Amino acid sequence: MFKNDQFYWDSYFIILGLIESGKVSLAKEMVDNLVYLYKKFRIVPLRNRFYNLGISQPPFLTSMAIELFRVMKNKTWLRKVAGIAGAELKNYWMGEKGAEKHSVYYGLSRYCDHYVTHLAAEHESGWDMTSRFDNHCLDYLPVDLNSCLYKYETDLAEIYRILGNKPKEKNYLSRADKRKRIMLKLMWNSNKGFFFDYNYKHREQGNFYSIAGFYPLWARLVSHRKAKKIRENLKMFEYKGGLANTQKKGLSKEFKQHDYPNGWANQQWIAIRGLLNYGFRKNAERLAKKWLDLNKDVFLKTGKFWEKYDVVKYDVGKSERYTIQSGFGWTNSVFLKLVKEFC
């Protein structure tokens, strides 16, 4: 992350590491800042810069709140964050009015920026850039976004159960069940045993394999039987250094950084945590070891952790839009979480 910049979805993965490191107050302050931004601008922006106020990023606010509540046990704070997350869900991600209309088809949402352009919508996805959307991001109902929103609904149900608000708990569970049924109908491919983005403009399911198809495991959206089928598709993504972001074939002529052969720490965590959710520990441990070894070996060679990695060539990731960043917040945090879980 750039100095003084707080990116939305980066914050969730960084908070995981901060909590593990005992820096709970700093993690809480990060969430408090996102709450402040929503109160002031009615959006949790991609990052805290004025020119990003028309675009968000994959939503993880409830996940941050749940992680922090486990260690803080502060119901007053949890209630405050839940109120903001509920407003963000309703007014932004489920918004049907205004320029950045997100809820567009049977209650499912898309990525969309204030100027309603495919390019900027792809930036909101966090996958800037990828062959996944074929340069038509506005036309797709993304499986990762709607998995995140399903998790918002189940998280909020759990939060209101903790707070003793039965009507809100029941309401959010009902919403989550509706979203799940529609996602299974439009995005689940029983023959391939995997989830795909849905092109609502053409009324057809996509056929592009991306690591976004593992988000339903992370969100606990599917049955154990379907989870087993999803697990079988690891072979589409798994290499010496871990999971590549996408399929190998059918990519754009020009390289895009969220495509094969790059792997990203945040996506490794989503897939590994998803596998653990369904008891697939051996698979999760194998992937974690590959990723940890890659991070360690490249660190010994370069003296740095990196934003992304080439999981095929077992090296620093391929650059595209900008010079590859060292550091790196979510890489450091995911490395720490995986060490704590498996070492």
Image (cartoon, helix red, strand yellow):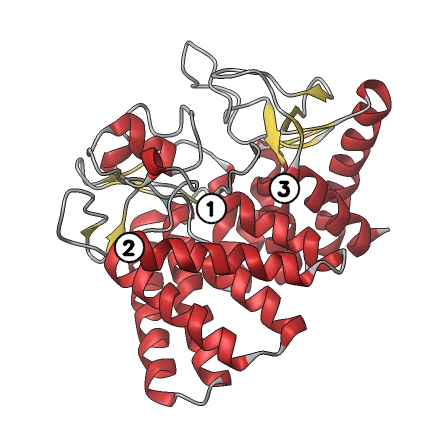
The residue drawn where x is 42% and y is 76% is 157
- In percent of width and height, residue 78 lies at 50, 74
Instruction: Name the secondary structure under disc 2.
Output: loop
Which residue is denoted by mark 2 in the rendering? 42
Instruction: Name the secondary structure under disc 3.
Output: helix
Of callouts 2 and 3, which one flags the residue occurring earlier in the amino acid sequence?
2
The residue drawn where x is 41% and y is 9% is 253
Q: Nearer the viewer, mark 2 or mark 1?
A: 2
Amino acid at the residue labelled 1? Tyr
Q: CA distance from mark 3 to mark 1?
A: 18 Å
* Crowd rating for badge 3 (residues with CA inside 10 Å; few <14, some 14–19, many 20+): many
Which residue is denoted by mark 3 in the rendering? 268
Q: Is there any visible trace of residue 11 in the rendered image?
A: yes
The residue drawn where x is 62% and y is 61% is 277
Amino acid at the residue labelled 3? Gln
Question: Would residue 220 be found to the left or right of residue 105 on screen?
Answer: right
- In which quadrant is the N terminus drawn? top right
Q: CA distance from mark 2 to mark 1?
A: 14 Å
The residue drawn where x is 47% and y is 46% is 8
Question: Would residue 291 be found to the left or right of residue 36 on screen?
Answer: right
Which dot marks residue 192?
Answer: none
Amino acid at the residue labelled 2? Arg
Q: Nearer the viewer, mark 2 or mark 3?
A: 2
- In percent of width and height, residue 68 lies at 60, 66
Q: Report the front residue among 183 and 38.
A: 38
Instruction: Name the secondary structure under disc 1.
Output: helix
Q: Is residue 312 above or below residue 290?
A: above
* Crowd rating for badge 2 (residues with CA inside 10 Å; few <14, some 14–19, many 20+): some
Which residue is denoted by mark 1 in the rendering? 8
